[in-house]
Image (spheres, rainbow, N blue to C red):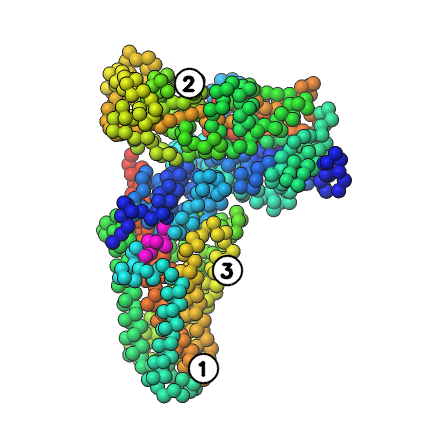
Amino acid sequence: MQRSDMQRSEALTEADRLMTICNSCRYCEGLCAVFPAMEMRRAFTAGDLNYLANLCHSCGACYVDCQFSPPHEFNVRVPSVLAQVRHESYADYAWPRALAPLFRRNGLAIALITVLSIAAFILGFVALNDPTALFARRHGPGSFYALMPHNAMALLFGAAFLWAIVAFVNGARAFWNDIGEPASTLAQPRPLLQAVRDAASLRYLDGGGVGCYSEDERPSDNRRFYHHLTFWGFMLCFASTSVATLYHYLLHREAPYPLWDLPVVLGTLGGLGIVIGPLGLYAAKRKRDPALLDGGSRGMDVAFLAMLVLTGATGLALLLLRESSAMSALLALHLGAVFALFVTLPYGKFVHGLYRFLALIRYAKERHGDAQQTASS
Amino acid sequence: MTTDGGIADHPMAYDVVVVGGGNAALCAAIAARRAGASVIVLEVASKFYRGGNTRHTRNMRCAHDAATATLSGPYSEDEFWDDLLRVTEGQTNEQLARMMIRESKEMLDWIAEQGVRFQPSLGGTLSLGRTNSFFLGGGRAMLNALYLTAEQLGVDVLYEAEVVAFDIDDDRFGAAIVQRSVGKTRIRGKALVAAAGGFESNIDKLVEGWGEIARNFLIRGTSNNRGTVLDLLLGAGVDSIGDPTQCHAVAIDARAPKYDGGIITRLDCVVFGIVVNKDAMRFYDEGEDVWPKRYAIWGRLVAMQPDQIAYIIFDAKSASLFMPSLYPAIEAPDIGELAGKLGLDADKLSATVAAFNASVRDGSFNPDILDDCRTENLTPPKTHWARRIDTGPYYAYPVRPGITFTYLGVRVDHEARMMMKAGGPADNMYAAGEIMAGNVLGRGYAAGIGMTIGSVFGRIAGRGAARHAAK
C-alpha cells in the first residue's frame, strides 16, 4: 500500500513545496538529472516526488548554489529533504510489508541481525563439530567444508540470496507502480543502456562536473572515488563467489584456493574495495555539512557501510590467517557477516542502488522522449 | 594598532581596496591580484548573502563570433550595439558601450578561467540561447567560483564590513572607514574600486524619486543595496550619471517578501489574461508585444495604479502556458467568487470581464508569435492573444512593482576611472558594476547586460587600480 496523495508525510509536503520553488527558478537544471526531470512536470504527485528523490545522488551542489537556501526565508534544502523522502520511500516499497519497520531504526536492526547471525554460525560450528574443532589448524582444499559441508553452505546462502532477490523484485514493482511507469519501459534497450552507463560512472555524483560538496562551497571528488571503490569492490566480491561456485560444481575444485587463483584475486581486490571504500565514504559523511543530510537516515547509512567493512575485513583476515588456528573462528565470523549482509540487503541502504537505477532508466526514457518531441515540434 | 577618534587602523595597507562583493567587485579583485596587487574586498553582507544582485542573476551577454558548446550561434559586436541602442533609446555613451562590447568577447573565456562554468540556456529561456551565456548553477554558483578563486589567489575578504566613510582628498582616495561588529576600522589603500551596487533597497531614497508610492514597492534583491557608497562618492565630488528617479521595475507576485524574492516571484502570464487594478478596471494593452520585450514596463504600469497593486486574471485555458512561479494562483469557480477572494468588487470585475469577452474577435491563438487574437472597440485594447475568459476555474495573481536596480551612478571614463564634478578623472578611484552602469545603460534593460557591465568594467577597474598602485 503506497502513501496516497491524500495523506502525505511532512517530508513529501516539504518536497512538493521545494520542487515548486525550484521549478520557478531552474538555475540548477544543468547540475544533475533531478531538475530536468522536475521541469517535465508542473505539479507533483507523491509518486513524482519519490521518483525525483530516488534520482537525487545527494551531491550537494544545488544547496551551495541556491540563493534561497538557509538562512534565506524560503529555506530551500533540496538534498536533505529528498534524502528524507527517499528514506521513507524505502520503507514504503519494502517486501514483505511486515518488515517495513526495519527501516525505522535501521542501524539497531542491522546490528542485532548481524550479531545473531554470527552467533548462530559459531554455535552451529560448535554444535556440528566437537568444540575443539573451532581451534584446530586445518589447511588445504576442503578445509572450510570440514566445518560446514559445502552443500549446507550453498543451500543456506542460496536461500538467503533468493530471498533478497524476491524482495528486490517486489520492491522494484512497488516503486515502478508508485511512479506510474509502465512495465514496458524496462523492455526498451536504449534507456536501460543509458541507465547502466550513468550508474556505472556515477554520472550525477559529480556536483555538475567539479565534484560533490561536503563541508562548504569547495567541491571534492572523493565521494565518487570511494563510492566507485565500494561498488566495484562489491561486484568483485560477488564475482569471486560466483567463480568459486563454478569451480566447485563444474571443475570440482574445492576452496580454499591458492593465492594466485581467480576467486582469491577477485575476492582480495573486492575485499579491499569494500573496506577502503566505505571507510572513505564514512569519513566524507562525517565531514559533510549536516544541512545536506537527513539526520534520520544516519543509522541506516552507517549500518550498511559497517556491514560492508565487516564483510570485507573478515574475508581478508580469513585469507591471511587461513592456515592458522584462528581460521575456524574467522570463517564463522565471515560467514555470519555475509549471511547477515545478504538477508538485510532488501532492508537497508543497499536498496538505494536499486531504486536509483530504476529512476535513471525512467529518466533516460523521459529525456529521450522529450528530446524527440522537441525535435519534431 | 593605533586608534584615531575611535577608529582602529587596519593592520595592513593594501594596494587596492574593493568595496562591494558582487560580480564586478570580484572581477576587479581577481584582475588586480593577478596583476600583482595586494587586494582587500569589503562586503557589507554576511557570507551567505554576499554578492548583491549577482546572487539572483543567471547569465551574461557577451559578443562572440561563432556558436560555442553553450551558445547556439554568433552574436556580433554590431548586433549587440544595436540591441543596446534599442533598449536604451540612445541613452548610452557610445565610446564606452562599444569598448565594453568589444571587451565582452574576451570575457567569456576570462570568466571561465576564474572557475565559472557555463551551460546552454535554461528551460523556458530559449530566446536567449544565442546571445547569453548561462551560469551552471546560477548566480550564486558563479559567485562561489569567483570567491574561491579570489581566496586562492590571496585576496582578503571581509564580510559584514560596511563602508561608512572615505578619506578622499580632492580626487584622491586614501582609506575606507569600515563599520564592523568589533567597531570602526580604517583600511588604507593606494587605489579604490567602488563596486557596491545601486540603492534599490533603500526605500527612503526610492521615496525621494517616486514619492510615497515607493513604500509599496518590493525589492527583488537583498536588503544590502542601500547606496551608501554611491552617496559618499557623490558627496566627495564625484560626478554623477543617470536619472536619480529611475529604476528598473517589473511586476512580481504581490505576496513576495519585501526583499530577496528573486526570480521565482516573477509572473509570465500577463499576455494570457487581462490585468485589472483595485477598481477592477483594465489599464493597459496586455498583448502589446511578446513578453520578453514587455515584461519590464509592467512594474511602472502597476506603480501608477492606486495602492500600487494589480491583478492578472485568466482562465483554465491558459493555466499551463507559462513558467510556474512560487505562489499558486488564486482560484475560484466563477469570476464573482474570484473577485471576492481578491477583495475586488464582484460586479465591477464581472462587468470588466464581460466587456472584454464581448470585444474579443476570434483568431488562431499562437503564444509563440504576434497572433491575430485581438479585441475590437475596447479601451485599452488587447492587441494579441486575446481569448475570452470563459472557462472555469478562473485564476488570478496579485502583482506589485518589484525593483531590480537603479540607474543613478558615478560617471567614469574608458579606464573605469571616476570622473570628478570639477572636471577630469579621479587620481586613483575606479568604479564597476551597477554603481556605474548608467554610463552605458541610461535606461531600459537587456537580459544579462548587468553582468557584462560588471565583468568588463570590473576587470578594467581592477587592472587599472593595480597599475596605479604599482606606480
> In the drawing, what numbered circle is on residue A326?
1
Left or right: B22 in relation to B381: right
In the structure shown, which secondary structural element does the residue marked by tag 3 occupy? Answer: helix
Where A350 sits versus A241, above or below? above
Q: Can the viewer see residue A157 in this picture?
A: yes
Q: Tell me the distance, in whole angstroms, between the alpha carbons under discs 1 and 2.
A: 88 Å
Give the residue type that dot 3 points to: Ala
Residue at the image position 31 percent from the left and 42 percent from the top: A44
**Quadrant showing the C terminus of chain B:** top right
Q: Which residues are magenta?
A: A85-91
**Residue A89 highlighted magenta (yes or no):** yes
Q: Tell me the distance, in whole angstroms, between the alpha carbons under discs 3 and 1.
A: 30 Å
Residue at the image position 33 percent from the left and 44 percent from the top: A367
Instruction: Give the quadrant of residue B386.
Output: top left
Instruction: Determine which residue is flagged by label 2.
Output: B306
Q: Seen from this angle, which residue lies furthest top?
A: B377
Give the residue type that dot 1 points to: Ala
Looking at the picture, how far across and down is residue B300, in whole percent?
45, 20
